[in-house]
Amino acid sequence: MQINFAGTNLSIMNEYDVKKIRADFPVLEQKVYNKPLIYLDNAATTQKPIQVIEVVNRYHSKLNSNIHRGVHFLSDQTTNAYENARETVCKFINASKKEEIIFTSGSTGSINLLAFSFGEQFIRKNDEILITEMEHHANIVPWQMLCERKNAKLKVIPFHDDGVLDIERYKKLFTDKTKIVSLIYISNTLGSINPIKEMIRIAHDRNVPVMIDAAQSVQHIKIDVHQLDCDFLVFSGHKIYGPTGIGVFYGKEKWLDKLPPYQGGGDMVDIVTFEKTTYNELPFKFEAGTTNYIGAIGMAAALEYISGIGLKKITAYETELLEYATKTIDDLGGVTIYGRSPHKASILSFLINGVHMLDSGMIFDKMGVAVRIGTHCAQPVMQHFHIDGTLRASISLYNTKEEIDYLCKAIEQVKTMFA
């Protein structure tokens, strides 16, 4: 799915009940430094609605018990909720079956799982792995570690200065040594929505599997793994209004059957003897030990919350808010925005000309505006632009036009102070 926000209008804002949505998020009601909190750090972590908080609290306070194998009431209730959560994730991304859904600690844990398991099974000396120049460190370092272990090679798909991937260069990077492509769907720094479906097709034409990092996309646009035809996909609960420490690793069953387990321990085994251990069936062979079962239940509640609002409505609202923010900041002058792809999600990375990002961020903070500063775990992106980092304002379903106006007021304040 690609979104072009050029030429849209703000009509959706008249239909989208953001006031009602904001009432579900208690953290947004507070003040910081005696000013209303303007939370624009959603790409780092989203806030949690009361519906998720209550579910998590209920299981901690009333139903907490380790899942699987328990025959008593509490274990049975929590086990059922955990497996129902797996079914919820399955439906949310339109996987073929719930056994293709593996719960992990998050996107980082999921990518490490794949890099290790796929690497052990399929990567040999001089094999090649393709990633993009705009990847989060979590989709760079595990593959680098694999390449060091196996003496393989990491190859990088570059992007143009507007934040659009060089697809022609991508096609030319494939060789008979290419074993896997691992791609970010939406850049956590540039906001670029990459042409994932086309890139998957290109890879599959060469019989190469594709992993999609959906950590920054699953909360903004509809993900359908069947339609995309990706082989693997990962995302994190805390970026889609769920708890921290929980995430998803999706894989086509044909691949999961071939991959060895990433970790050993309880629940991932079938029979254990000192001579040999056999492994459990999917999905349990990849879920060693006690998982974050309450986190999984909480994440499922977050997905149900999103579904209740409707991802199409969320996408339209956030896209129009991004258009408004981009135009308003451009009109201020004296601000450089990094990432000008025509297909973009609600992330704005920018610098106020002549002002260090740390100085800007500290003034924003005193005005109650929460943004992220730094490299955003994407140092190669900063190296591309020859900068040390940016301020990043990331827009979510509960942000408003008035908050964008206040962000612009904060930018003007910084410009005045450092004139």
Image (spheres, rainbow, N blue to C red):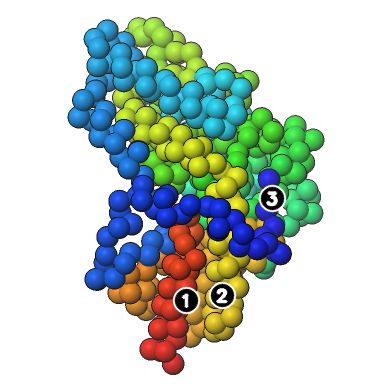
Where is residue 59 drawn, in percent x and y?
Answer: 26, 28
Q: Which residue is mark 1?
A: 408
Question: On the picture, is 273 further left or further right than 188?
Answer: left
Which residue does the numbered mark 3 point to in the structure image? 2
> Image quadrant of residue 163?
bottom right
Q: CA distance from mark 2 to mark 1?
A: 7 Å
Looking at the rendered structure, the kind of residue marked 1 is: Cys
* Residue topped by disc 2: 328
**Dot 3: element:** loop
Residue shown at 57% from the left, 33% from the top: 93
Contact (Cβ within 8 Å) of mark 2 with mark 1: yes
Image coordinates for residue 3, horizontal then vertical, percent? 67, 53
**Do the residues bearing badges 3 and 2 touch, measured as CB atoms within 8 Å?**
no
255 is higher (above) or lower (below) than 318: above
Look at the picture and state if 211 lies above or below 410: above
- Of mark 2 and mark 1, the one earlier in the sequence is 2
The amino acid type of the residue labelled 2 equals Thr
Residue 8, which numbered label? Answer: none
Between 299 and 186, the one lying in front of the other is 299
Q: Earlier in the sequence, mark 3 or mark 2?
A: 3
Q: Percent x, y for residue 52?
A: 35, 38
Q: Nearer the viewer, mark 3 or mark 2?
A: 2
Q: Secondary structure at mark 2?
A: helix
- Number of numbered callouts drawn: 3
Amino acid type of the residue tagged 3 in the rendering:
Gln
Tag 1, which secondary structure? helix
- Whether residue 184 is visible: no
User: Residue drawn 48% across and 85% down?
Assistant: 354
Pointer 1: residues within 10 angstroms few (<14), some, or many (20+)? Answer: some
Look at the picture and state if 363 lies above or below 23: below
Q: Residues within 10 Å of mark 2 (few under 14, many from 20)?
A: some
